[in-house]
Amino acid sequence: MTFWDSTTSFFKRIFGVTRKIGEEEFKEHRRSSLDPVTRSGVCYVPMQGYERIEHYQDKQNLHHLGRYEWAVRVLSDRPDRDAVLDCACGVGYGSLRLSTIYPRVEAVDIYDAAIAMAKERYDAPAIQWHCMDAAKLREAFEDESFDAIVSMQTIESITDDQKYLDDLKALLKPGGVLLIDTPIRKFRVEVPENRHHKRYYGIDDWIDMLQSRFEVRAFGSLPDAAFLERCKMPSQGSIAHCTKVGA
């Protein structure tokens, strides 16, 4: 049983219900935190012990946690589960979820403080943590190393996004799956409001970019699409299930 499972179980046992955390409580927790990663806002940090969507109703928490809950649902049904790449993993709550179904999880993030928090909060024997640039994945891993890759809210921060997708495809085994997400706008935005982002995609160029490399299922045709709707995904094109076809 994981830490959050035991925490949730204790709360249910004592009070008979699952604790619900309101949006204002979560914001106050973040504002009052002494932890620099939580306060910085550079990456999402869930409240420790409450890393499941059952505790939340607000868009931010449902979106961030729901993506990984969806990923585990989808990947649990796959016959080949030897190794998965989590890029960029942030503070690692998703990597820990993935380690419940994969014996090897390679978790990558460029933010050293996030990796330090990940090791402290969410470490597990199956996980290897890497503080590195996602643009240099093929310097660290061999081609066709992974059955699956999870890349949530990453590509919009990569300078050479075309190379990044080429790298992800090369790292996947034939038949491997890429679960990928990015902010979507009605039209492409070259100067985003977030200074950490290089661009935002319009739905058409986003899907075209993926389809030039993978077999793609977008929102409406995804496994558990109804689950993703409950997680308040901001756009029906923002998350995709991609399969590497052939060699």
Image (cartoon, rainbow, N blue to C red):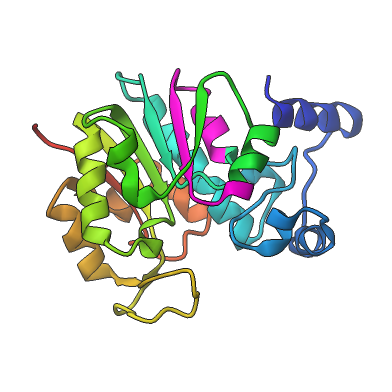
Percent position of residue 99, x then y: 51, 25
> Does residue 186 appear to the left or right of 37 in the view shown?
left
Percent position of residue 226, x then y: 43, 48
- The correct choice, above or below, for 58 with respect to 144 in the image is below
Q: Nearer the viewer, residue 82 or 170?
A: 170
Residue at 37% across / 64% down in the picture?
Answer: 156
Q: Nearer the viewer, residue 165 or 110?
A: 110
Q: Specify the quadrant of the image occupied by residue 19.
A: top right
Q: Specify the quadrant of the image occupied by residue 247.
A: top left
Count the labels in the image.
0
Query: In the current view of this chain or complex, which residue is farthest to the left?
Result: 246
Q: Specify the quadrant of the image occupied by residue 78.
A: top left
Q: Please tell me whether residue 105 belongs to the stretch shown in magenta.
A: yes
Percent position of residue 96, x then y: 57, 31
Query: In the current view of this chain or complex, which residue is farthest to the right?
Result: 14
Q: Nearer the viewer, residue 44 or 162?
A: 162
> Does residue 199 appear to the left or right of 208 in the view shown?
right
- Residue range (magenta): 94-113
Residue at 33% across / 62% down in the picture?
Answer: 237
Residue at 46% across / 41% down in the picture?
Answer: 108
Q: Nearer the viewer, residue 58 or 189?
A: 189
Percent position of residue 87, x then y: 42, 44
Q: Is residue 243 visible?
A: no
Q: Is residue 84 visible?
A: yes
- The correct choice, above or below, for 68 with respect to 173 in the image is below
Query: In the current view of this chain or complex, which residue is farthest to the front?
Result: 139
- The correct choice, above or below, for 86 with respect to 234 in the image is above
> Does residue 209 appear to the left or right of 32 in the view shown?
left
**Quadrant into which the N terminus falls:** top right
